[in-house]
Image (cartoon, helix red, strand yellow):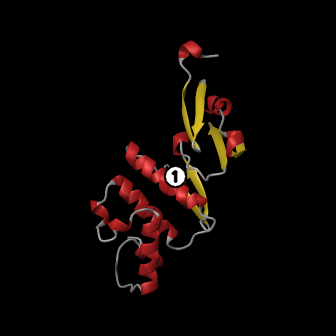
Amino acid sequence: MVVSASYGILGRWREVYDDLDHDRAASLLTEVGASHLSERAFGTLSEGERKRVQIARALMTDPEMLLLDEPAAGLDLGGREDLVSTLSVIALDPDSPATVLVSHHVEEIPPGFTHALLLREGRVVASGPLERVVTAETLSETFGMPMLLTREDGRFAARRRPRHMAV
């Protein structure tokens, strides 16, 4: 699956891959924590394993930008946390491509991401450096309800402010 990105295809036909392609694919699988999956068929992988392999495949061609639209959708808590950890490794690598992550959940923002854009009904609520943009106030405006926000070890957590505390 990963090596096929060299030709921009999903299935194998008549293309021939050289050692450089196989070495690059193996290196990327290791980078995303999926080297143990290299001999497995894609269809046998869990959803979390598939996400990691797909990210390795996307990186195979050395893109200028990596666009991830809701990459944690469909993952359980463990799968999400593993994915966020993988994305953090990528984000903290100075040689990685610029990465855009689309998510409705601040818990999915990996350490290493630097900027945010919050939208509500197609309008920009806030944009800029993460620390300035992701606040209880901007999240409250974005989601139309009073929100509480915490940050620990570079990770955010948000929840609705209890009704008895609503301001």
Instruction: Give the x, y percent position of residue 31.
Output: 47, 66
- Based on the displayed image, in which of its 4 quarters is residue 141 positioned? top right
Front residue of this view, candidates 9 and 56: 56
Q: Residue at x 64, y 30 (%)?
A: 136
Q: Depth check: 112 or 76 in front?
A: 112
Marker count (numbered): 1
Residue 143 drawn above or below residue 106:
above
Comparing 36 with 72, the one in front is 36
What's the residue at 36%, 58% (across, down)? 49
Rendered view: 152 above or below 32: above
Q: Mark 1 points at which residue?
A: 69
Q: In which quarter of the image is residue 150?
A: top right
Q: Quadrant of residue 133?
A: top right
Furthest toward the front, the residue is 153
Tell me where residue 52 appears, x and y as whole percent: 42, 60
Residue 122 visible in this rendered orientation of the protein: no
- Left or right, 167 with reference to 47: right
Q: Position of residue 106 (x, y in %)?
A: 56, 40
Q: In this view, does 89 lie above or below 12?
A: above
Tell me which residue sits at (34%, 77%) in the image: 12
Residue at (46%, 84%) from the top-left corner?
A: 20
Q: Where is residue 118 in the image (x, y as percent from the top left)?
A: 64, 41
Residue type at numbered disc 1? Asp
State the SS at label 1.
strand
Crowding near the residue tagged with mark 1, few <14, some 14–19, many ≥20 C-alpha atoms within 10 Å: few
Left or right of residue 136: residue 40:
left
Above or below, comparing residue 18 to residue 78 in the picture: below
Quarter of the figure with the C terminus: top right
Q: Going by the image, does 6 lie left or right of 148? A: left
Quick one: which residue is furthest to the top in this view? 164
Residue 6 seen: yes
